[in-house]
Amino acid sequence: MRRALRDNSLGIVFGLLFLAALAGQAAVGHADFNDEQLDHDGSPISFWRYVTSSAFVVDVTENWQSEYLQFTLFIFLTVWLVQRGSPESKKVDEAGAGEDPVPDRTWRTKLYSNSLVLVMGTIFLASWAAQAVAGRVLYNADQLDHHEAPLTLLQYVASADFWNRTLQNWQSEFLAVGSMAVFAIYLRQRGSPESKPVMAADEATSVEG
């Protein structure tokens, strides 16, 4: 058991951090939602009703979709694009898909060779779709409160509200990934596989010294 925990400690710790953060978001989100309800002469709702509401779902999924978009694009684009000197990049002369020494080039092999991007991209699209559905429900509730016409799903996806929720997350993800790739050229973190060795030259790419 101890060895299994050690061998999977990174995934376990991040899984626990995720659950703790999600529980915290649910708790404070529920309190904030009920405070707003009372401010508008509404009735507070139960915790379970809140975590199954469109208000909570849209807040969660709009962050999930941007995170998975970030990693999907990063995995896919780093096949061909490079950043000289960054450990997040291949060497400049190694850009491209390349070939693995796999004798069986069946459709299963081809599917498996792109499975990481496919799975990450599928999660992105699913969470983005969930954001659109939940966001429309929340938006239309506000529309009806103001005696205005509700929107269809297609109308909502083309609305400023949907793209405001979407782009405010995308821009931060793109900034974070780009900053990481560039900062790692010049900065170090001893012991991290995301960093070059401390004494590696700035122009060195990956973990070469």
Image (cartoon, rainbow, N blue to C red):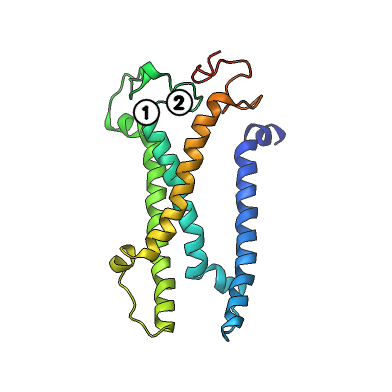
Q: Which mark is residue 49?
A: none
Position in image of residue 61 (x %, y %): 47, 57
Inspect this view and state whether residue 94 appears. yes
Residue pictured at 40% horizontal, 82% vertical: 144
Residue pictured at 55% horizontal, 28% vertical: 184
- Give the mark nearest the N terminus, 1 or 2: 1
Q: Which residue is at the front of the view, 6 or 63? A: 63
Q: Which mark is residue 81?
A: 1
Q: Tell me if mark 1 has few (under 14), some (14-19) or many (20+) residues whose alpha carbon lies within 10 angstroms of its own.
A: some
Whether residues under marks 1 and 2 lie with C-beta atoms below 8 angstroms apart, the answer is: yes
Q: Quadrant of the C terminus?
A: top right
Q: Which residue is at the front of the view, 60 or 106? A: 60
Give the side of residue 18 with respect to residue 149, left or right.
Answer: right
Give the side of residue 52 with respect to residue 123, left or right.
Answer: right
Establish if 87 lies above or below 93.
Answer: below
Give the side of residue 208 with respect to residue 16, left or right.
Answer: left
Furthest toward the top, the residue is 209
Residue at image mark 2: 89
Q: Secondary structure at mark 1?
A: loop
How many angstroms separate mark 1 from mark 2 (CA)? 8 Å
Establish if 198 lies above or below 164.
Answer: above
Q: Secondary structure at mark 2?
A: loop
Q: Which residue is at the front of the view, 79 or 110? A: 79
Q: Tell me if mark 2 has few (under 14), some (14-19) or many (20+) residues whose alpha carbon lies within 10 angstroms of its own.
A: many
Q: Which residue is at the front of the view, 69 or 82? A: 82
Amino acid found under the numbered disc labelled 2: Ser
Position in image of residue 133 (x %, y %): 38, 65
